[in-house]
Image (spheres, coloured by chain):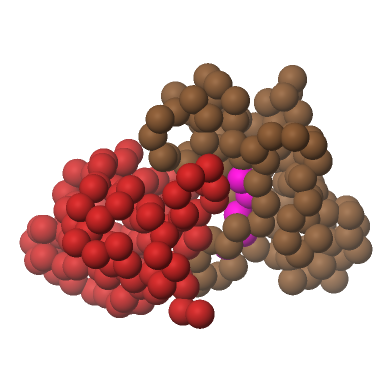
Chain colours: A red, B brown
Amino acid sequence: DAGITQSPRYKITETGRQVTLMCHQTWSHSYMFWYRQDLGHGLRLIYYSAAADITDKGEVPDGYVVSRSKTENFPLTLESATRSQTSVYFCASRVGGSSYEQYFGPGTRLTVT
Amino acid sequence: AQSVAQPEDQVNVAEGNPLTVKCTYSVSGNPYLFWYVQYPNRGLQFLLKYITGDNLVKGSYGFEAEFNKSQTSFHLKKPSALVSDSALYFCAVRDAGNAGNMLTFGGGTRLMVKP
C-alpha cells in the first residue's frame, strides 16, 4: 500500500524559475491538501481540493498554482520561485464525509537560491 | 476564526514517567480536535481525534488525550514515556460549524524523552 507519495523529496532551484511539486495518493481520497512548514509558523495551508477539478485557496496561496485533473494527483506549482518560498512542503489527503483526519506524505524540502 | 495554542515549545520527561503535551483551542462552534506526531524527515502521522462522545480519547502507540470543554483544552498524555516517543507533536482543530475544510495547526511541541 503506497499511500501518499511526494516527489521530488529534495529540490534546489533558483529565484524566478518555475518548479512543480508532485503528490500522488492511492487511497482514492476525495480531499487533498498542500501545506508548508516553516520554523515559527507551524503548518500553513496553501491550497486544497475537494474533488477532481475543484480547488480552493487556503491561508497562504499567493505565488502558488494547483490543479487536479485526476483524483489521485494534486501537483503544486511555484510559477516564479522566491527565496521566501524556501520551505518543507507537505501534501495530505482525507476521505470525504465526517472523517476529518488527514494523512500526510513524507514532504518535499525546497530550497530557492 | 479557529486557532490552536501549544504553550510549550519543548517538554522534557524521563523514560518511564508520565508525559503531558498541552493544547488549547478557540472555535466558534463545537471543535473537532486532532493530535499528530512528526518524526525527523517524515510527514505528520495521525495519532487520535475527538469529534464527540467520551472526553478521554485513546489513540495509537499508547497515547490518549483528554477533552475539556470548560478549559478549551485537549492535552495529549501517555502513562509511561518511551525514548522512541521523542518527536514533534502537533495539535489541530476544525470548527464543526465551518463549512470549509481547514484544519488549523498549533506551532508544535518537541517532546524529549531521556533514558
Q: Is residue B81 left or right of residue A39?
A: right
B67 magenta-colored = no
Rendered image quadrant of residue B60? bottom right
* Residue B46 falls left or right of residue A36: right
The range drawn in magenta is B34-38
Q: Which image quadrant is residue A82 in?
A: bottom left
**Where residue A98 appears, x then y in whole percent?**
53, 42
Locate residue B62, reporting x and y percent. 81, 60
Q: Is residue A107 visible?
A: no
Please give the name of the residue rendered at 64% of the width and 38% of the height, measured from the top-left corner.
B51
Depth check: B63 or B90 in front? B63
Q: Is residue B58 above or below residue A19?
A: above
Is B2 drawn above or below residue B18 in the view shown? above
Q: Nearer the viewer, residue A88 or B47?
A: B47
Quarter containing the C terminus of chain A = bottom left
The correct choice, above or below, for A19 with respect to A7 in the image is above
Q: Main secondary structure of the magenta part?
A: strand
In the image as oriented, which residue stretches furthest toward the bottom? A1
The residue nearer to you, when weighing B107 against A57, is A57
Q: How many marks?
A: 0
Tell me where residue B20 appears, x and y as whole percent: 79, 47
Residue A89: quadrant of the picture: bottom left
Determine the residue positioned at 91% across, 63% down. Answer: B16
Tell me which residue sits at (59%, 30%) in the image.
Answer: B31
Q: Is residue A44 visible?
A: yes
